[in-house]
Image: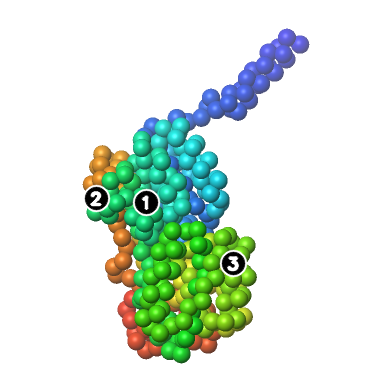
Amino acid sequence: MKKTGKLMMVLALGILMSLTGCSKKIVEGPRIGVIQLMEHTSLNMIYDSFKEELEALGYKDGENCTLVFKNAQGEQSNIGSIVSSFQSEKLDVVVAIATPTAQSAAKLAETTPVIFSAVTDPIEAGLTTSLEHPDQNITGTSDEVAVEQILDLALQLQPDLKTLGMVYNVGEVNSQTNIAKAKVAAEKRGLSVMEAPVANTSEVAQAVQVLSEKCDALFSPNDNTVATAMSTVTQITRSAQIPVYVGADSMVMDGGTATIGINYVDLGKETARMVDQVLQGTDVSAIPVKVFNQNLSIYVNADALEALQLTLPDSVAADPQLVLLNDPQ
């Protein structure tokens, strides 16, 4: 009985040690916090390519660095809780993916460098007063939307386009900036505009339905709320036989008709390089915000063209920057 009792005690102690983390591997090296606003293709592409580039730079999670990843699931309250938890995490750098996340993470910059990704207008968002010389211990990558070029592409695909519907989350600073630009660009091109602002994903379907009944096409910038609901947007607009022009290549992948812009993989990679610079000792103020607005590609959804019975003009079809997505060929 005594031997049995001792054996049971040893087994219990072993289980207790495993549960309490006594056997947990201690990882030396930098600790990198990452906050992602929500799940959708654009942001997922950024985080995935960010991790891949970090590894290419020699940072292997669990071996010589630690990635502390948190997804806010689109809830502002979650972002606040994550930021609060990060204040006690002893992190070497924090990465904030998307504008609302970066704005909340800014309070961490008092003690920890913050690198943002996919912030359309960092100055308007209050993250810095200078793109060239960041002055708040925050820098990062900007996904500026080529609004005028997107509307020109829309007119090439739809020469008879007259009324453009705009759906976006009025609470997102990046969307406010791009919609303001889009309205000016539309007026220059003689287009009428109808707006349907939303507050969350549950309002997107109704907004798109209303616009689809009154407009020749829809436009949504790189709006996180709309991007999350692209399957719904696609279903409604294809049923109504109207195109959707969007602000991100990933939104084209998810059913949008076309855009002109950057590859979000490049955005994630550059964000990783900035993190590396910080970890190597470069001061944040010496790392300019990188605005991705050069060497843009034309992204067109081949399935959407077929479903909407649209034909690419020769000038677009022959453009070396054309990328056909969802093309069965």
- Is tag 1's residue or tag 2's residue first in the polypeptide sequence? 1
Tell me which residue sits at (67%, 16%) in the image: 9
Query: Is disc 2 surrounded by few (<14), some (14 to 19) or many (20+) residues within 10 Å?
Result: some
Q: Which residue position is annotated with label 1?
A: 126
Report x, y in % for residue 305.
50, 82
Tell which tag, 1 or 2, sits nearer the viewer: 1
Q: Which residue position is annotated with label 2?
A: 133
Tell me which residue sits at (44%, 58%) in the image: 173
Three-letter amino acid code at disc 1? Answer: Gly
Disc assigned to residue 204: 3
Query: Is disc 3 surrounded by few (<14), some (14 to 19) or many (20+) residues within 10 Å?
Result: many
Indicate the secondary structure of the residue bearing disc 1. loop
Three-letter amino acid code at disc 2? Answer: His
Tell me which residue sits at (34%, 41%) in the image: 113
Tell which tag, 1 or 3, sits nearer the viewer: 1
From mark 1 to mark 2, how far is it between C-alphas?
A: 14 Å
From this viewpoint, which residue is outermost toward the top? Answer: 2
- Is tag 2's residue or tag 3's residue first in the polypeptide sequence? 2
- Asked where in the image residue 157 lies, by quadrant, the reply is bottom left
Q: Nearer the viewer, residue 1 or 67?
A: 67
Q: Evaluate whether residue 42 shows in this view.
A: yes
- Is tag 1's residue or tag 3's residue first in the polypeptide sequence? 1
Report x, y in % for residue 6.
68, 13
Report x, y in % for residue 214.
57, 82
Three-letter amino acid code at disc 3? Answer: Val
The N terminus appears in which quarter of the rendering? top right
From mark 2 to mark 3, how far is it between C-alphas?
A: 38 Å
162 to 96, vertically: above or below: below
Residue contact between numbered discs 1 and 2, judged by CB atoms under 8 Å = no
Tell me which residue sits at (73%, 15%) in the image: 4
45 to 301, vertically: above or below: above
Residue contact between numbered discs 1 and 3, judged by CB atoms under 8 Å = no
